[in-house]
Structures are given as C-alpha cells and as structure tokens.
Image (tube, helix red, strand yellow):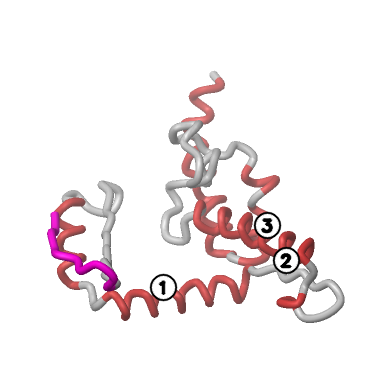
Amino acid sequence: MTTFSAIAGQTTSVEKVVTVFTSQETKLPLQAAQNKLADLPAYAVLLEAHQQSWDAVWQHSDIEIEIEGDLFELPAKGRNAQLAVRYNLFQLLISASLDNDRVSVPAKTLSGFGYRGHVFWDTEIFILPFFTLTQPAIARNLLTYRYHALEGARRKVK
C-alpha cells in the first residue's frame, strides 16, 4: 500500500507495474514475480517497449477499412466499422498465447468469465485461419495445444 498527499488543483500521476507468474513457468511464482519486478526498468521504458511490441503485432494483424479516401477521414459508419474490426482483432490477439502451447483460446476470450477455464472448442474453424495468416507462431501453439490434449480427449470418449 502507498499513501501520499495530493494538492487540490494539481495533477497527480500514479504508475502501477505488475508482474505475473504461474506455476507453469516456475516452482516459486511469487518469488519470480518479485524478482522480475525488482529488475524492471522505469515505467517510461516499459511503456515504450509495450508500444513497440503492439506496433509490431499490428503490422501483421491489422485490417484497414477505406471508404473513399483516407482512413481517418471515414464517414461515421466507416469509423465505427474500423473500430469494431480492430476491437475484435484485439480480443483475438490478447486471448491466444505466443509463448505457451499448453493453453488455448478461452471460450469467452479474456473479457468474459462465463465458462470458467473452458477453451473455445472450435478454434480451428473460426480462429485458427486468422492466426495462420497473421501470427503463425500463435497458430502453431493452438494446434500443438490440441495435440497435447489428444490423449485426454480419447480417454473421455471411451
């Protein structure tokens, strides 16, 4: 917990940096998170790295809608369509792991709690084509996840 005094009429900024580890990465997640947090650079450096990382993702994954002219001069309907498409792409991108082939896309991605850990059962039909064309490493992880789950699936159908 942190406490501070604020002055009326003066802007106060608070930076919150969080690290997350699970037992999938290490035997001591809390210790790993604390060690990582202690070694992180300043917030401004982290923010710049975050922005660069997302810029790289969007280079391969963005879809732009143009209606007679520049993207940013779209009529209201075009802007709304552009925002809707990008929002949905963002939901896909944050729900699939680039680094872990032991997880799949949650049934309600990361924005819904409804299915409590279940994965999207028809990932290969609806989600995999997008990742195959834009983020092949993620597509490979999603397919490898299914491979890892085969034995358990076979046991369930017997």
Question: Which residue is outermost to the right?
Answer: 68
C-alpha span from label 2 to label 3? 9 Å
Residue under circle 2?
79
- The number of numbered discs placed on residues in the rendered structure image is 3
* Residue stretch rendered in magenta on the structure: 1-10
Asked if 150 appears above or below 80 in the picture, the reply is above
Residue 19 falls left or right of residue 155: left
Q: Residue at 45% across / 46% down in the picture?
A: 103
Residue 112 falls left or right of residue 133: left
The answer to which quarter of the image holds residue 120 is top right
Q: Residue at 18% across / 72% down in the picture?
A: 39
Residue under circle 3?
84
Q: Position of residue 80 (x, y in %)?
A: 72, 60
**Quadrant into which the C terminus falls:** top right
Q: Position of residue 5 (x, y in %)?
A: 14, 64
Residue under circle 1?
50
Asked if 22 appears above or below 50 in the picture, the reply is above
Q: Amino acid at mark 1?
A: His
Mark in the foreground, 2 or 1: 2
Q: Nearer the viewer, residue 72 or 101?
A: 72
Question: Which residue is outermost to the front?
Answer: 8
Residue 65 falls left or right of residue 146: right
Q: Amino acid at mark 2?
A: Arg
Q: Nearer the viewer, residue 91 or 140?
A: 91
C-alpha span from label 2 to label 1? 25 Å
For marks 3 and 1, the one nearer the N-term is 1
Q: Position of residue 49 (x, y in %)?
A: 39, 77
Most frequent secondary structure within the magenta stretch? loop
For marks 2 and 1, the one nearer the N-term is 1
Mark in the foreground, 3 or 1: 3
Q: Position of residue 33 (x, y in %)?
A: 20, 58
Q: Decide if residue 147 is in sight here.
A: no
